[in-house]
Image: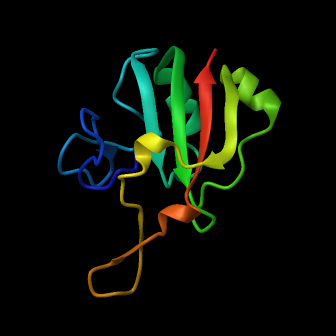
Amino acid sequence: MFGGQTSQLVGAINVDIIATEGVQAETKALPFANESVDEIVASGPQAGFLSEAARVLKVGGRLYINFSKGNAFGKLPDVQILKQLELAIIQLSGPLEAQFLNCRFRRTSPRPDGTVDIPISSIRTTILEKI
């Protein structure tokens, strides 16, 4: 999710409002059945996607949230809300997971090409699991 136009992850289905490959969709209304997805990777997510991610994740499925200080993800909801969503914290703001080290993280900028790379060293990963 939030992969931009195409996914950087082999075998992943890209989901983004600007997707040219994968699924063009709002993350607040994912076009997937309940408990049908094994893994979700959200890079630079905006707030408000957790309930949909929880809905489509299978029990035991994991949600990897990659973010930097500068993105709008912010803090997780309190433990009570996570419990209602049936999500457990596995890792909170840990180092970037090895499987994402080859990804390129960008943000929009006023530069002519519209993006600027975010240093990989500033990316953190939070991992949630559907219980």
Q: Nearer the viewer, residue 81 or 108?
A: 108
Callout count: 0
Residue 27 visible in rendering: no
x, y (%) of residue 64? 52, 37
> Who is closer to the viewer here, 51 or 12?
12
**Residue 116: x percent and y percent?**
39, 76
The x and y percentages for residue 99 are 42, 40
| Residue 115 drawn above or below residue 89 | below
In the picture, the quarter occupied by the N terminus is top left
Horizontal side of residue 20 vs 87, given as left or right: left
Question: Where residue 16 sits in the image (x, y, percent)?
Answer: 33, 48
Quadrant that contains the C terminus:
top right
Q: Is residue 115 above or below residue 9?
A: below
Q: Is residue 63 above or below residue 42?
A: above
Q: How is the image coloured?
A: rainbow
Residue at image coords 70%, 30%? 89
Find residue 104 and report its image quarter: bottom left
Residue 19 in view, yes or no: yes
In the rendered structure, the answer to whether residue 100 lies left or right of residue 48 reads left
Q: Which residue is depicted at the point 74% across and 22% down?
A: 83
For residue 127, side relative to residue 77 (left or right)? left
Residue at the left extreme, as displayed: 21
Quadrant hosting residue 69: bottom right
Query: Which residue appears at 34% of the width and 29% of the height?
Result: 31
Q: Quadrant of residue 126?
A: top right
